[in-house]
Amino acid sequence: MSSPARVAPLGTDPYAFQPGYYDLFRASRGEGALPDPRFFAGRAPEGGHALEIGAGTGRITLAVAERAATVVCLERSATMRAVLLAKLAERPHLRDRVTVLDRAAPHFDLARRFDFVYLAGVLEHVPHAERLALFEAIAEHLAEDGEVAMDMVLSEPVPDWPEHVTDEATLGDCRYEMSCEARPDGDDQAHLRFVYRTYHQGDLVETEVVERAHYLHRPDAVVADLAAVGLTPTAGTALHPVANGEDPGTLVARRTT
């Protein structure tokens, strides 16, 4: 018999249950897992200095750190930071390059500028009212010839679907499953409910639930806020949608000349 479902309390670390599942499910998807590390690493200037906002477990961090001289990571989740630190411990050649800080957007001040600032899979967590403040902070930390890259600048409808299984993976005698439910919650916003289930030899032994808001950031609104802080989009699928499997909603911007 399974134990009662564990529910992540609102207002606490929203990723208290998720870091292990996060990497497990993305590994099972292979190169098709989003966000796409290749997009962000490909934009990182070789030998430059990078700032990552919302590093998570470091899927993108590690790829960027292979090119950049240094990467400073901002991550509010203690559990996500712990996973990232464990990965760095296994990669001695990156230890001197990556700094992991307990900081949260949009309000941060590192008193320095970076050649490359990026947000991978982050915008959906940013309330619309905080987007301009976030872009202001990015502009204040961006070098004159620097570049900012992001994804999740989307034109898709607000998600609305019943609970259904979206990911599953098997390790030994255990099968891990994630299901998701989405319901609209105002303009360009949805409420997401994730349920993580663990089965041992076919029996359900653990259930963990996480609920959070999901914010959709539309291209026109994002471009307007970037312009307000002196940044101009130069590339990305948010400007020129494609259907070839690229990371959807990517956007790259530089200072207005």
Image (tube, rainbow, N blue to C red):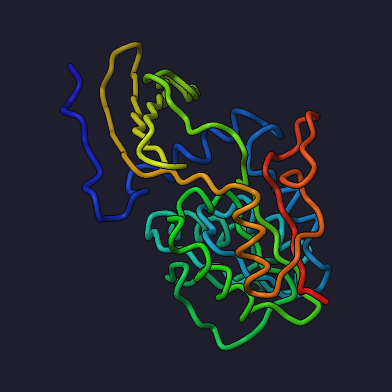
In the image, residue 167 lies at what x, y percent?
Answer: 50, 24
Q: Quadrant of the C terminus?
A: bottom right
Taking the spot 53% from the left edge, 40% from the top edge, the residue there is 23
Question: Quadrant of the rendered structure where residue 156 is?
Answer: top right
Taking the spot 37% from the left edge, 40% from the top edge, the residue there is 186
Question: Is the residue 177 above or below the residue 240 in the image?
Answer: above
In the image, residue 115 lies at what x, y percent?
Answer: 75, 75
User: Which of 119 and 178 lies nearest the eye of the viewer?
Assistant: 119
Taking the spot 48% from the left edge, 23% from the top edge, the residue there is 166
Question: Is the residue 213 above or below the residue 199 in the image?
Answer: below
In the image, residue 240 lies at what x, y percent?
Answer: 80, 42
User: Which of 57 and 156 lies nearest the eye of the viewer?
Assistant: 156
Taking the spot 65% from the left edge, 65% from the top edge, the residue there is 226
Total labels: the figure holds 0
Q: Quadrant of the N terminus?
A: top left
Spot the residue most to the top.
Answer: 202
